[in-house]
Amino acid sequence: MSSSVSSKTRYWVLALAAIVLDQWSKWAVLSSFQYRERVNVIPSFFDLTLVYNPGAAFSFLADQGGWQKYFFLVLAVAVSAYLVRAILRDEFAALGKIGAAMIIGGASGNVIDRLIHGHVVDFLLFYWQNWFYPAFNIADSFICVGAVLAVLDNIVHRKDGKKT
């Protein structure tokens, strides 16, 4: 098992890097912005802002009175535990392991927010004219890219039946 763990070190480093980058970026925004303050970075396209999300993606269940915090904590821990186990058991090829590590890191970053702040800190805001994509953070980016990589890995793995 120890050789299995050590051969997976790059995935744990990736997950840790996601957590560190996410938490550092949130610390920088929290220490520099007031709630709902916006700073334009790219005119008519991208702002930095500070908003809080007690729900999930796109503020799903944000107005539910608090129970959702615990639900999303348990969900993130359960999904992360499953992905750690899958990496250790080589249930994914290399691309899937990278994706899983990114999801683990991103989910952990948002779990840290929920434990410390009671909500997730979001600060990246993309928009065009009157259309706004909901604000998100670095952890969310790792989760989304990781999910895409995991799906791609699954598609490739099903076609050729080999792990790389």
Image: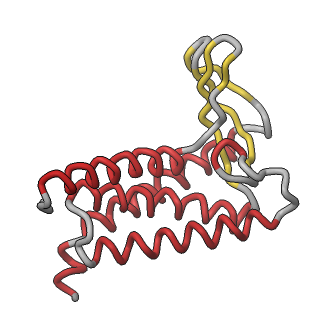
Image color mode: secondary structure
Residue 68: name its quadrant.
bottom right
Q: How many marks?
A: 0
Q: Establish if 151 lies above or below 11.
A: above
Q: Is residue 31 left or right of residue 104?
A: right
- At 39% from the left and 62% from the top, the residue drawn is 15
- Specify the farthest residue to the front: 159
Q: Is residue 72 left or right of residue 76?
A: right
- Specify the farthest residue to the bottom: 1
Q: Establish if 75 lies above or below 160.
A: below
- Specify the farthest residue to the right: 65
Picture coordinates of residue 150 (x, y %)?
A: 34, 54
Q: Quadrant of the N terminus?
A: bottom left
Q: Is residue 109 left or right of residue 164?
A: right
Q: Quadrant of the C terminus?
A: bottom left
Residue 145: name its quadrant.
top left
- At 73% from the left and 53% from the top, the residue drawn is 55
Picture coordinates of residue 72 (x, y %)?
A: 66, 64
- At 67% from the left and 49% from the top, the residue drawn is 121
- At 40% from the left and 63% from the top, the residue drawn is 16
Picture coordinates of residue 34 (x, y %)?
A: 78, 38
Picture coordinates of residue 17 (x, y %)?
A: 39, 57
